[in-house]
Image (tube, rainbow, N blue to C red):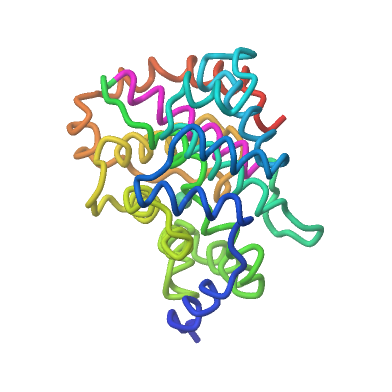
Amino acid sequence: MKADVNHILARIEELPSFAESVRKIIDLFNKGEVDVKNLEQILAQDAGISTQVLRIANSSFFGFGGQINSIKDACMILGLPNVYNLVTAAAILDRFPGEENSIINYNNYWLHSMAVAIATKVIMDKANKRSDSAFLSGLIHDIGKLILDMYFKDEYLKIIQYQKNHQCPMVDAEKSVMNIDHAELGAMLLESWKFPKEIVSITKNHHKLNLEHNLDVSCSLHLANILVKGLSIGDSDGNHITNISPKVLSHLELNWDDLLSLLPDIEKQVKDNEIFH
Ligand SMILES: [Fe+2]
């Protein structure tokens, strides 16, 4: 019997959100009231999040290794939207530490997610596109899987069994067992945590491109996910590869050879990146 989506939604809405500091920052950002001073003040109360933010800010992803020593530096060098993305990324890493009885291997999960974040940016650079959402979108695109792992374990085990029996993509197994897939589940959670609409939409559409917001990031992330699975970096659904929609390549004005030429750079950047080591 399939799970009731309304019941799932009700459970998601009950989940504990972030620390007060992060909730305040999301709130200020949504209202357009965030500035360097209030970010510094709020993060001064939360050493854990601040440390994680500085760690990610100094990773090779942003290319300023070792130069960012304070939240103020991060705001000045990376800009407020990027610092907002780092705060929420740090909060999510903090919020989903993994448990002893986890079904997912968290190291492989975060390695896959970080690699997708990096590959999304590499593809966008090649296509001459820019967006501050690339990093956060890549990092959290599969967050629905962590919800399955932490809060719907019985259903998740059934999904894995279904996928093995039918040899189908994981999203199809999720739909068959739960009536909802991890992309929709992740988007529901991010929406209830008041994340920007753009990030919610990109998360929701990372497998099927029914796009409302930021086609550039969505298309790049869709390709990044496939390339990273092809490179077997980390693990996501046993790195089952899905087809690339021709629409995606034509939107970015890229071809297969362009994508293949990016693989060594993606592999190198993932290796150099120490966020999750
Ligand atoms: Fe996914």
So how many labels did they put on this image? 0
Query: Which of 217/2 is in front?
Result: 217
Q: Is residue 214 magenta?
A: no
Q: Nearer the viewer, residue 169 or 217?
A: 217
Extreme residue in the right direction:
100
Image coordinates of residue 131 in percent, x first then y, are 33, 31
Which quarter of the picture shows residue 114?
top right
Q: Give the overall secondary structure of the magenta segment.
A: helix
> Image point 70% across, 59% down: which residue?
103
Residue 229, given in percent of the width and then of the height, sits at 50, 37
Q: Position of residue 101 (x, y in %)?
A: 79, 62
Q: Viewed as shown, does residue 2 lie left or right of 108?
A: left
- In front: 48, or 144? 48
Which residue is at a point 48% across and 32% down the rendered structure image? 36
Please provide the residue range marked out in magenta: 108-126
Q: Quadrant of the C terminus?
A: top right
- Vertical comparison of 155 with 44: above or below: below
Residue at (81% x, 58% y) in the render: 100
- Residue 19 visible? The answer is yes
Q: Which of 116/256 is in front?
A: 116
Q: Residue at x 31, y 18 (%)?
A: 126
Is 117 magenta? The answer is yes
**Which percent across, then down, holds residue 181?**
44, 64
Report whether 263 appears left or right of 212.
right
Residue 200, image quadrant? bottom left
From what the image shows, is residue 123 above or below residue 192? above
Query: In this view of the protein, can residue 168 be seen by the observer?
Result: no
